[in-house]
Amino acid sequence: MNLQLPEYSLQVMSPEIFLFVWALLVITFDLITKRKSGTAVGYMTMLGLALTGAFLFQAGYGRGFGMMFFNDPMAIFFKVIFLGAAFMAVGSTFGITEKRIVNHRGEFYGLILMSTVGMMFLASSQELLSLYIGLELTTIPLYVLVSFFKDDKKSVESGIKYLIVGALSSALLIYGISFLYGLSGTTEINQMTINIAITHIQNETLGVALLMPIMLLLAGIGFKLALPPFHQWAPDVYEGAPTPIAAFLSVGSKAAGIVAFSKIMVMGLEVFHSPVMAPNDWGMMVALMAAGAMVWGNIAAIRQTNIKRMLAFSSIAQAGYIMVGMLAMNEYGQSSVGFYMFVYMFANMGAFAIVTIVEDQTGSCEISTFSGLSKSSPFFSAAMAIFMLSLAGIPPLAGFFAKYYVFAAAIAHAGQNNTTGWLYWLVGIGLLTTVFALYYYANIIKVSYFGKEASPFKLKAPLPAVIIIVIGLLGVFGFGLYPEPIIDFASNLSDYFKR
């Protein structure tokens, strides 16, 4: 028997290979300098991420190992988000690595890079098992990072919760994948779509054969995205995790879940989105999860006194808005989701960077800590206000256009398809809950600017953290005033799903 190896190209995989090797170098550098490198290992990590971004556009499009690795516009776009989120998260860590992480800086930064490598492999995966492996490589380092403060009970507790929930979601996901393999006889996503369609035509209907895998897949991915009713872990994990890691979870891990959902559900099971495919249709299920995320995420956020828990519930609500665009199965749907994730990165990572600075110097993440901050630290309070307004969707900031595009895409799809009129209701819920969101976002501004006394803390931040905040501000303003470049880039995602 002749063993035929799949075609491979190391060039298209060069960014992932480079970043993996760089992660090993970061850990080694920290060891050979006897962990006395201070901030050097952090700067080295940021340099590696920047160089990987340069390699990313040099690698171009193409296949790596058959259908297991394929660089396409969607992969490139989300890899930019992954690298950007990792870069901004690392830039926010310089305060905590000087005070709370002294002996394991190399491992800390190496795990962030390893998780980023997993996200990048996930984005290029065109096969279910390699997609699952990429998702696991993404989350396993995060289990360690979330509980990195070993002397902090909340950090250890959040790590255990995240591990248990992550293991359960992974089990559900791989179980659902096994069902899809049984129905299609393949793990390649493109071929799976064809095989399931042929089976459906030949047998006239699949009955409830797809219902079980669809429910398992939505539950598994729902855990990753913290969509109700699979969201309970998020507030506790965000509160206990190191703040930059909570930020990385809210953007990088969420974007990875979005990619997994897009590849499996939107690309692989697109035909079963419509209610005419009942009981195997998944569109209404996702709509209910999205509505729950928008309603509960925003209502629960109002009651929070800890800003990390508030941002956790905000992240749940933002996942609901993203799902509204995901349900728009037209040329605007995927591009609106891509644009949303891109601009969400700037506002959310910037907000978490400021929370990290406040926590480092005050030892508290309570919202009351921000009282009177505008008088003692006007730059940081103004930046926080801008990030909050962008997350709330106030024009002319980028967050407004992000919400506008996902809602417009959903309305356009509902107008073109008589069977998806329920999307109008979903958009209505989104618009209504946006008003609720404005309350708790504006509360941070009110506390900062209308506190009775000036804050006793005058915030001082490491240079990398200030740079991250400035990058966030430039992204929020720049892509709010001139969103066309990113929209044009994101519009290529729709072409990917038409292949």
Image (spheres, rainbow, N blue to C red):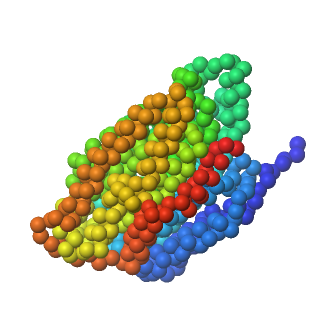
* Residue at the (59%, 73%) spot, across then down: 51
Query: Where is residue 311, by image quadrant?
Result: bottom left
Residue nearer the viewer, 215 or 447? 447
* Residue at the (68%, 35%) spot, across then down: 192
Q: Would you say 50 lies left or right of 3 here?
A: left
Percent across and percent down for residue 345 are: 45, 59
- Tell me how many marks there are: 0
Query: Considering only vertical position in the picture, is 191 above or below 278?
Result: below
Query: Considering only vertical position in the picture, is 299 above or below 400?
Result: above
Percent across and percent down for residue 248 are: 44, 59
Q: Would you say 265 lies left or right of 240 here?
A: right
Q: Would you say 292 lies left or right of 68 here?
A: left
Q: Residue furthest right?
A: 1
Percent across and percent down for residue 285 are: 46, 31
* Residue at the (73%, 64%) spot, across then down: 11
- Which part of the image, by quadrant, shows the N terminus? top right
Q: Would you say 112 lies left or right of 446 here?
A: right
- Residue 116 visible in the picture: no
- Residue 63 visible in the picture: yes
Q: Residue furthest left?
A: 452
Query: Considering only vertical position in the picture, is 461 above or below 286?
Result: below
* Residue at the (37%, 46%) spot, across then down: 317
Percent across and percent down for residue 368 are: 18, 61
Query: Where is residue 93, by image quadrant?
Result: bottom left
Query: Where is residue 203, by image quadrant?
Result: top right
- Which part of the image, by quadrant, shows the C terminus? top right
